[in-house]
Amino acid sequence: MTRFGKLWVFVLILFVAVGSFAAGMGFYAFLLSPALAESPATAALSLPVGSGSGREISPEEVPAEFVTFWEAWSFLNDKFYGEIPADSERVYGAIRGMVASFGDQNTAFIDPTRAAVMSENISGSFEGIGATIRLDEVGRLIVVDPIPERPAFKAGLRPDDIILEVDGQSIENLSLFEAVLLIRGPAGSEVVLTVFREGQLKPFEIAIVREEIEIEVVESEMLSDDIGYVRLAQFSNGAADKIFEEATDLIDQGASSLVFDLRSNPGGLLSEAVAVSSLFLDEGTVVIERLKDQEDKRFEVDGRHLDVNIPLVVLVNAGSASASEIVAGAIQDHERGTVLGEQTFGKGSVQLPHNLSDGSELRVTIAEWLTPAGRQIHGEGIAPDIVVEMTIEDYEQELDPQLDKAIELLSDS
C-alpha cells in the first residue's frame, strides 16, 4: 500500500469536541416565541428557558428591542405583497441574524432538520466527500484540505478553491455548519459544487460522488530498521491507549525514533489530546483553557508515558486542527520534538452545544485554548519548526516530501 493509501481521512465535517471540556458547563438560551396578539406593545410573551418551560412576563418586562422586533414582524405580516414564509422560518432567520452579529463562525444556529443530521454524524455515520473547509473573514467557503484518494480530490477539488454554490444553492449567509451539511449526503449520491479558483476566468462546476469515509483511527509501521511511524486520524475515545500500544510495539521491534503523523487530523476530545501529549512529555502543562470571566485552567501532563527521550518528529498540515494543534503546540513549547510540515488550521476555540425546545441547536463559543507558553491557537494555528510544503504534483505522483524530510532528520539524529 502506498503512503497515501494509508492516509485514511475523514468526512467533510467540523469536529466539535463535547466531551471532557463540556462537563459541568451550563447554558440557557432564550427564544422569543411569536405570540399571536393584536398589538406587539401589549402582548404577553412566554420565554422558554432551558427545558422549554416558561413563565408569562408583563409588557413592562419586554426589552425595547423585542418590541421593535414585533413591530417589524406585524408590519411585514400586514403589508408584504407575496407569499409569507412560515413563522418558524422567520424565527430561524432572526436567530441566524442575531448569531451572525457575534462575528464568530463557530458560534452557530442549526435548524431541527440539520441538527438531527449533525447528531447522526457525531454518532459515527460518516458519508461525504472527504475534505476540510473553513469560512474566511468575509464569509467565503474555502477548501482547506481535499484528502488524497477521497472523492473531493479525485473529482478535482483543490486547496484554496472557493465554493460558491452547492447543487445550485448559494451558500451566502449560511453558517459553516449549514454549508457542511449541504455538501454531505448519502454514499453514492452526487453533489455539484460551483467553484471559483484563482487563475480561472469564471466559476466552474465540479461533480462529486459521495462515499462512506472509512476511519482507521490509528495505524503504524516500521519505516526502517530503527524509525517507527504512527498516524492518528482523530482524537476519539481511547486514542491515547491505541497510540501507546502501537508505539510500544514499534519500540519493541527496534524503533529508536518516531514519526507521529497528525496531518489532516481535525481534532476530537480534549481529554484525549491531553492524554496523547502526556505520552511524550514527562511533566508540565499541556494546554491552557481560557473561559469568559474566569481564571485560566491548566491541563497538566497526566497518565503513562512512552520513552520521553526518544527522538520525535510531528507532521502537521492545514487540515491539522483543534486537538491536533494542542498536541503540536505542547510538543513545540516543551522542545520535546520537531514539528514539521505546513501551518495548521487554527481552530483553538471551544463550543458548547445546546439543544433548543423544538429540536434546533445552538453551538456557542465559550472558551479558547492556548499553548503551554500562552500562544494563541485560534485564528493563528501552529507554525512548524521546519516548513515543507506538499504540492498538487506531489499528491498526484504519491510523493511525500514531508515524511521524507522527517526520515532524513531522524536518520541524522
Image (spheres, rainbow, N blue to C red):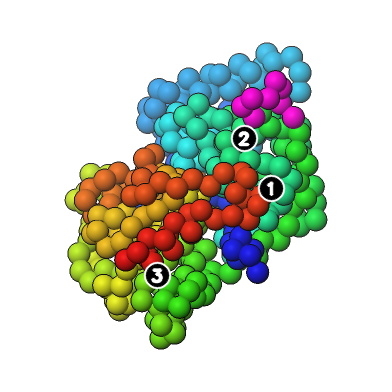
Tell me what residue is drawn at x 40 percent, y 22 percent: 64
Q: Position of residue 264 (x, y in %)?
A: 52, 54
Q: CA distance from mark 1 to mark 3?
A: 31 Å
The residue to which callout 1 is attached is 152
The residue to which callout 2 is attached is 161
Instruction: Assess disc 2: are there few (<14), some (14-19) or many (≥20) residues with their C-alpha within 10 Å of its C-alpha.
Output: some
Instruction: Give the number of marks.
Output: 3
Residue numbers of the magenta segment: 197-204
The mark nearer the N terminus, 2 or 1, is: 1
Tell me what residue is drawn at x 68 percent, y 54 percent: 150
Q: Secondary structure at mark 3?
A: strand
Question: The residue under label 1 is which amino acid type?
Answer: Ala
Q: Quadrant of residue 38?
A: top right
Queried whether the magenta region covers residue 122, the answer comes back as: no
Q: Secondary structure at mark 2?
A: loop
Query: Could you say which disc has been placed on residue 258 in the image?
Result: 3
Residue sitting at the far bottom: 252
Locate the N terminus and report the quarter of the image it occupies.
bottom right
Q: Quadrant of residue 212?
A: bottom right
The mark nearer the N terminus, 1 or 3, is: 1
Q: Position of residue 86 (x, y in %)?
A: 69, 33
Image check: 298 left or right of 384?
left
**Which dot, 1 or 3, sits closer to the camera?**
3
Queried whether the magenta region covers residue 198, the answer comes back as: yes
Query: Could you say which disc has been placed on residue 106 in the image?
Result: none
